[in-house]
Image (cartoon, helix red, strand yellow):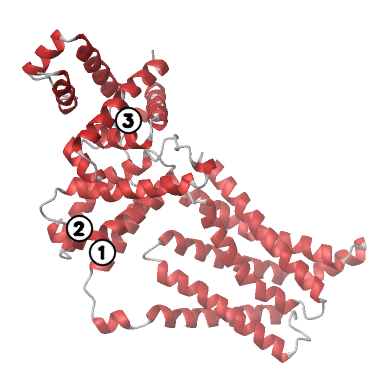
């Protein structure tokens, strides 16, 4: 990241190949494919524009996800001005993998998406960063600009709510 | 260990084996045991993360765009307005070819030189704008580049259709046979002539690009701007009402074809 920030194209390629699918997944999990693709392009342009301000003392993951989380929040705010778009997109978005072949897996995936979509955004973003992006709570707190205890508390409530919802959907 | 400490520890150890201290507390505290079970099952219920891959064409477009930005270029080359010069060249050539196409069919006959010059200048300006957007944004935003290219192609198709079956002649034929007014006929035929080429393009573009509706409308807007001078130039013999009806018909056709193309393309993808 440091080399990329100094303008090294090869370092950018390494960083991009490592993070692009994870960052796309972070967007595609809640938005429809077209929106996710558009936001993905905007996200990388923002990362590129902000690279000069990267602090080498910070880990890369929270820095990248901080930009991604801000972008997602902006999209939510934009949608909140248009109530008809407020509902999260729960259709599968550009996902690939062997689980797609299984109807059962697809049904489970839909149930998980619906349950996640039903959570408040503040809880959902913490759960996604923790469960799917494997960020630690201090890293999530750094990415979201919140305190570690506040983030843990949101995750606690979110996981408990998910458990209830998923038990209802898949008894 | 207190319950508060246990709760914090539970979160830190979520998805991993419990440490002996936490396990001992959970065994002796019913409330924490329930919380722990809820958390573990909520965590496990989410299952493995679905793997998402950025679509290759989008991923490569972003890569190219950033690499192009990182590439060291000589200042002189970077500052030369190649895009602008090429746009002027292509735009002027396209406008000249389009005028020639109309002229070869006698569709510019009887037109005053001032009107002809004004139409030609505006038309060249619109073509230059379209080519400039195409060349300037191709690397940075290939989707927009393809949309403008599609709008240019649709405008070409419109001109070709109008060349083989000139709209004013069709309107006059219909007016004679059906006795309908020129205004409604110009509107109806204008809608059809604009909608057909744009529909072909909008459907295939929506299918290929997973476009957002407003992006299809951008293409529709470019298409209308490109065909509007052709409409203006062909209406020398007709009243201002007929010109307005044709222009409105072209707007309606562009909007309808953009919407229908988006719907058809999206549906085909689904």
For residue B49, say whether it is visible: yes
In the rendered image, residue A92, in percent from the top left (x then y), is placed at 42, 35
Label 3 neighbourhood size at 10 Å, few (<14), some (14-19), many (20+)? few
Q: Return the chain for callout 3.
A: A
Q: Considering only vertical position in the picture, is A91 above or below B260?
A: above
For marks 2 and 3, give the one nearer the viewer.
2
Quarter of image, res B162: bottom right
Q: Which residue is mark 1?
A: B67
- Circles 2 and 1 in contact, beta carbons < 8 Å: yes
Q: How far is the residue under mark 2 from the one under mark 1?
A: 8 Å
Q: Which residue is mark 3?
A: A98
Q: Return the chain for callout 1.
A: B
Is residue B120 left or right of B20 when viewed as pictured? right
Same chain assignment for discs 2 and 3: yes
Is residue B235 left or right of B173 when viewed as pictured? left
Q: Which mark is residue A12?
A: 2
Q: How far is the residue under mark 3 from the one under mark 1?
A: 33 Å
């Amino acid at each position: 990241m440091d080399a990329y920030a100094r303008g090294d194209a090869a370092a950018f390629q390494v960083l991009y190949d490592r993070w692009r699918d994870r960052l796309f997944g972070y967007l595609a999990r809640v938005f429809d494919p077209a929106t996710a693709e558009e936001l993905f392009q905007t996200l990388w342009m923002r990362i590129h524009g902000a690279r000069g301000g990267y602090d080498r003392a910070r880990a890369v993951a929270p820095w990248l996800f901080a930009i991604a989380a801000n972008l997602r929040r902006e999209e939510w705010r934009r949608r909140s001005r248009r109530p008809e778009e407020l509902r999260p997109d729960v259709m599968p978005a550009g996902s690939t993998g062997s689980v797609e072949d299984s109807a059962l897996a697809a049904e489970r995936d839909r149930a998980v998406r619906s349950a996640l979509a039903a959570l408040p955004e503040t809880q959902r973003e913490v759960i996604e960063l923790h469960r799917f992006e494997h960020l630690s709570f201090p890293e999530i707190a750094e990415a979201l600009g919140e305190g570690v205890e506040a983030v843990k508390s949101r995750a606690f409530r979110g996981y408990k709510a998910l458990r209830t919802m998923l038990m209802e959907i898949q008894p | 260990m207190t319950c508060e400490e246990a709760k914090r520890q539970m979160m830190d150890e979520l998805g991993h084996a419990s440490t002996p201290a936490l396990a001992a507390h959970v065994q002796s505290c019913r409330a924490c045991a329930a919380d722990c079970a809820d958390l573990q099952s909520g965590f496990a219920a989410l299952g493995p993360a679905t793997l998402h891959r950025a679509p290759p064409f989008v991923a490569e477009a972003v890569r190219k765009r950033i690499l192009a930005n990182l590439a060291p270029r000589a200042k002189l080359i970077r500052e030369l307005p190649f895009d602008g010069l090429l746009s002027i060249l292509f735009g002027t050539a396209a406008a000249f070819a389009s005028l020639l196409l109309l002229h070869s069919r006698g569709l510019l006959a009887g037109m005053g030189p001032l009107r002809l010059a004004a139409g030609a200048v505006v038309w060249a300006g619109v073509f230059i704008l379209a080519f400039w957007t195409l060349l300037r944004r191709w690397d940075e935003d290939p989707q927009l580049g393809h949309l403008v290219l599609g709008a240019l192609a649709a405008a070409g198709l419109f001109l070709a259709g109008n060349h083989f079956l000139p709209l004013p002649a069709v309107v006059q034929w219909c007016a004679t046979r059906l006795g309908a007014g020129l205004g409604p006929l110009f509107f109806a035929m204008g809608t059809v002539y604009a909608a057909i080429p744009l529909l072909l393009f909008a459907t295939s573009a929506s299918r290929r690009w997973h476009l957002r509706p407003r992006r299809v409308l951008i293409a529709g807007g470019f298409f209308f701007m490109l065909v509007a001078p052709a409409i203006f130039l062909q209406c020398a013999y007709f009243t201002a009402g007929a010109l307005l009806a044709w222009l409105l018909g072209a707007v309606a056709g562009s909007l309808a074809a953009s919407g229908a193309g988006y719907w058809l393309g999206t549906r085909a993808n689904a």
